[in-house]
Amino acid sequence: MPLPRIIKIKRLQQDAEIQKRMKSQQSLVEKRSNVDAELSHLKQHVPLMSDTSSECYANPNLHELSLEQIDGAITTINTLEAESNDLEKLIEKSQEKLSRERAIKESLKELESKVEQSQQPSQPNEQIDDLVTQQAGLIQYGNS
């Protein structure tokens, strides 16, 4: 298979990988948004343990809740906060990977362009080989 075609296929594969990563990242963002909304809702309706006794007298709805229910809600809040933090870290890693994927795509575009230019008889083969080796090194570094 000719080199320009191989590079084009790699670039298209890279495009697909970028699209996949963007969808994954969007899913993480949506999940975190849902977790944060649930967390906010719980925090509005459940006092912290230190405020429980005074809050129960002021809020008749809380007075009906048992301490076990309040404790369960606080445990849920803590779990959701931890999940939100974990999702934030995953989103950051996903963004880093997406940046690397885009850099690889740009390197492939440059390589494709240089190979197409190199197929014109004006450049010596050694120069072409150097360009291909250099771009391949950049791509390999981006994948690590």
Image (cartoon, grey):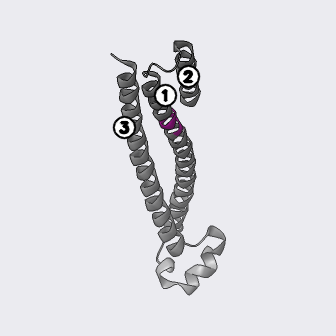
Mark 1 lies on residue: 114
Q: Which residues are magenta?
A: 103-107
**Position in image of residue 132 (x %, y %):** 52, 21
Q: Which amino acid type corresponds to the residue marked 3 in the rendered image?
A: Ala
Query: SS for tag 2?
Result: helix
Q: Are marks 2 and 1 in contact (CB under 8 Å)?
A: yes
Circle 2: residue type = Leu
Near-viewer residue (27 or 124): 124
Q: Residue at x 52, y 56 (%)?
A: 80
**Quadrant of res 134:** top right
Q: Residue at x 58, y 73 (%)?
A: 47
Residue furthest to the left: 1
Q: As drawn, is 86 to the left or to the right of 3? A: right
Q: Is residue 143 a member of the stretch shown in magenta?
A: no
Residue at figure coordinates x 46%, y 34% from the top left: 109
Identify the residue position indicated by label 3 in the image: 16
How far separated are the C-alphas under marks 2 and 1? Answer: 8 Å
Circle 1 or circle 3, nearest the eye: 1
Residue that appears at 50% across and 33% down: 110
Q: Residue 52 location, x and y as percent?
A: 60, 74
| Left or right of 134 in this view: 98 | left
Numbered mark located on residue 131 in the image: 2
- Which circle, 2 or 3, is nearer the viewer? 2
The amino acid pointed to by label 1 is Lys
How far apart marks 1 and 3 lie (CA) works out to 22 Å
Percent across and percent down for residue 75 are 54, 58
Task: Assign a secondary structure to mark 3.
Answer: helix
How far apart in space, not on screen, are marks 2 and 3 (Cα)? 25 Å
